[in-house]
Amino acid sequence: MSTTAPSLRAGGLSWRVRPRAVAVVLGGLVLLGLLMALGMRLGELPMSLAEVVSGAFDAGSAGHFVVMELRLPRALTGALVGAALALSGAIIQSIARNPLASPEILGVTTGASVAVVAGVVATGSVVGGATGLLATLGVPLLALLGGLAGAAVVYALAWRRGLDGYRLVLVGIGVAAVLTNVKFWLLTVGDVNDTARAMVWISGSLNGRGWEHVVPAALALAALVPATLLGARSLDALRFGDDTVTALGVRTGAARALLILAAVLLAAVATAAAGPIAFVALAAPQIALRLVRSGRPPLLSSAVVGGVLTTGADLIARTAFSPVELPVGIVTAVLGAPYLIHLIWRARK
């Protein structure tokens, strides 16, 4: 770790600017832009880059609907969801001091899945068959509420006069196992048409995502990214034991609670927008960690890497087996499984 990195100061706050981290962020943004531009061109109606640009600005052209209502909202949703999941994973891995930690252990994604499956199966004629505002907000709202409820259960069971990262992981794994079985039980007792609709969502899909999904995710990131960056100093301290953290003057309980709340909100918003997309929150922080070569998963770099991973996976999901389109969560799961095995193998060594 360099000790000569310049500092950025704003009022009474200061951040150390690491050139390698800046390069990773800028390089990732360029790659993200290229992937999104490629996604704009590919699809059932292939378009040149000039046609994409003209379609975006010419409301009367044939390509305007394709670009502005179909492909651009989908690409933006994917980038924002990936960034939110990766940022959530970076916070949780830093607090738990465990590279295998992710929003799943906080009960967010499993809680969201159970809530959506229960809602669709129990009230398919209401949520699944509704039209208008209820049809638009029904599933995302259920996912958001379910994710927050799942995280609250894990947090309450893990609390013992404070929050220990190791205990949080164990409780989260147990709660996730119970909720996963509840989800599969609901799928077995539900109507086949309702459960088929629920299965698409719990696989994690960006198909049909519009501006109504882009706006909430963008607002959540706009509010939570600055807040988590301000908490970076606490994350640096939380890498050490509680006694060391206390000696550094960090209020352990308050710092952990606020950062976990931010991680839960980020994961819940992302899951509400696109369903539980697997492995992005797990892999992106570790990839960013190795690229930046820092002591813990870097927040901003992790968010950019998460956006790149999700956008790239969605591009593969759309085009690899055309005209058949896969849920993006299946692609990330296929790509992430070998990575998880690699992490476990390294941990055993």
Image (cartoon, grey):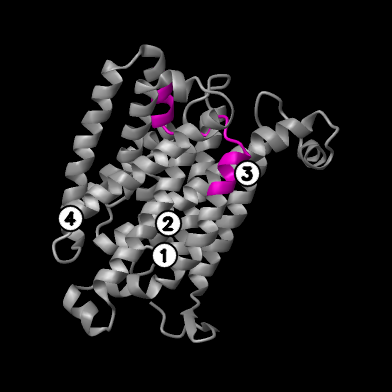
Whole-angstrom CA distance, mark 4 to mark 3, is 40 Å
Q: Which residues are magenta?
A: 196-216
Q: Find numbered disc 2 in the image and state the secondary structure of the residue it sits on.
A: helix
Mark 2 or 1, nearer chain start: 2
* Residue 47 shows in this picture: no
Q: Quadrant of residue 147?
A: top left
Which of the image's four quarters has the N terminus?
bottom left
Q: Is residue 121 above or below residue 301?
A: above
Amino acid carrying label 4: it is Ala
Please name the amino acid that badge 1 sits on. Pro
Residue where numbered disc 4 is placed: 158
- Numbered disc in front, either 4 or 2: 4
- Kindly identify which residue carries mark 1: 298
Q: Label the magenta part by its dominant secondary structure.
A: helix
Pinpoint residue 126: horizontal percent, then vertical percent. Answer: 45, 22
Residue linked to disc 3: 36
Between marks 1 and 4, how big is the CA–CA gap?
26 Å
Question: Can you identify the residue that label 2 sits on?
Answer: 87
Q: Nearer the viewer, mark 3 or mark 2?
A: 2
Location of residue 265 with respect to 67 vertically, above or below: below
Q: Position of residue 331 (x, y in %)?
A: 43, 33
